[in-house]
Amino acid sequence: MYPEKARQTGNFVLVLTAMVLGVLIGLMFASHNRHEADGTLEGKVNEVMKLVENEYVDQVDADSVSERILAAILSELDPHSTYLSARETERTGEMMRGNFEGVGIVLHYEGDTAFVGQIIADGPSANVGLLPGDMIVNVDGEAVSGVDMARDSVVARLRGPRGTKVAVQVQRLGRKHDYTIRRGVVRHETVTCAKMLDDTTGYILLSSFSSTSYDEFHNALVTLKGKGMKKLVFDLRGNGGGSLSSAVGIAGELLPAGSLIVYTQGAHSHRRDVKAPRGGLFTKGTVVVMVDENSASASEVVSGALQDNDRATIVGRRTFGKGLVQTDFSLNDGSSVLLTTARYYTPSGRSIQRPYTSGTGEYYRAYLEQLLDESYADTMTVHINDSTPYKTKGGRVVYGGGGIVPDKLLPYHKDESFVYYNALANKGLINNVAFRYVQRHAAELQKHYPDARSFGKGFRVSENLLEELIKEGESKGIERNNKSIASQRPLMMAMLKAYIGLAMFGNDAFYDAYLPMDDDLKEVINMKI
């Protein structure tokens, strides 16, 4: 995708960055220098940059080098302090706000071609005539498919201030169609599923913590309680965190007023206790929280608070272990620095953060080794980084020093019949085959199934589509495995339906098909808690 010259330029900047960083570190730690700087980090960085700009053998992109130097300096502090460019800052802000301004579609890419992967309900594109599977030919008269264009460029052309218009041409089954879309505010829902699993068990899946997550969670609780919920399964698997205020609000809905949720403390910040401000909507019923190795930060704050207050049973695998608080400092050019300013501690006093003194590389390497050892071993073991016994409100002993250890551990399933299925899934073939089906049948699906509910009840995956998936696997070097296919046929067909439903009708259709096949969720439902 990128020409050779661009790759060479990138390598040159990396080498130059390493050189400048090396010089900078030398200046920082040397007690005497030929040219005295003003003694501050800022002064030394400026001095080195002037040397590079004025004396270096070639012309350099000062902005690019300085950004890489800032990122490198911050990475030396801890694994989570980081520098964000202006564009990255803007994207992070969108994620935290829970909305953005654009046309309201999710893009699906195949090579250098962009397709309408999903149309967001109630968004600007919902009623203009676009269909999932449409190939985007051009935007405002400029070709975007079949050309060497970064994916961000397509997104940038479609997004824009609310109220402005954008002309989009798509190709559908060989014919071109033109649409004009008025941009608007597009909501990014973080409660991706909220439903009753049976007459008394409610289920809420939260994908991240944005500024809207608390309101979404609160509304979901109201709805599920109205349907008779007595037990809540709160799914935080894969949730990498986000807004602390939303995490506090969500935990507060499940805890009595005045309960300690979390406290923060750092070298330049005194201890700050955060408590549940009022009695929540669901403080009496049973709560089960599902977590895994990708649950981090705000997810760990919530699960740790509920565990330490003996309010919930935590089920799954040990969480990631990110307990460092980042404060966002804006820079003049729109970029920002996320600087670690404190640590999170659970109500019992446990630190959530895993050790990181050996460097960033070792930090992530140790995480993978721990995951393999704890989740794939025949007998699950838990490595304790902090042997200090902490006690929950009810007197149970828990340990800190790296993530939240569940009350009930769920190892990975090691059935060999999953190997074939995982090979298909990991290469994205299930999603790709489902999407090609949508490209051929979107109008027909829309006609026969007006919503996710009717799709869930009426649509069936054909044997022909399953065979198409198997042959797609063979074309990508995944040998047909009839024994595994026989064993995992229900899962393969359910996931094909889930991805078709996601493209056509959104998350409700996806989870209606997927959740009955979720083995960990099945175990939680059957647990006597």
Image (cartoon, rainbow, N blue to C red):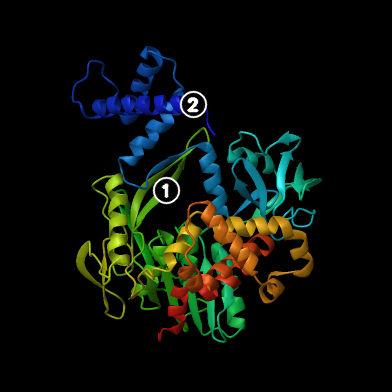
Q: Position of residue 224 (x, y in %)?
A: 59, 79
The quadrant in which the N terminus is found is: top right
> Visible in this render: residue 271?
no
**Label 1: few (<14), some (14–19) or many (≥20) C-alpha neighbours in 10 Å:** few
Q: How many marks?
A: 2
Tell me the residue at 27%/71% (across/down). 378
Q: Nearer the viewer, residue 496 or 11?
A: 496
Q: Is residue 513 above or below residue 295?
A: below
Q: Position of residue 105 (x, y in %)?
A: 67, 52
**The disc labelled 1 sits on which kind of residue?**
Thr
The quadrant in which the C terminus is found is: bottom left
Image position of 466 (left or right of 67): right
Q: Nearer the viewer, residue 36 or 288?
A: 288
> Visible in this render: residue 440?
yes
Q: Is residue 351 above or below residue 116?
A: below
**The disc labelled 2 sits on which kind of residue?**
Glu
Q: Which residue is mark 2?
A: 4
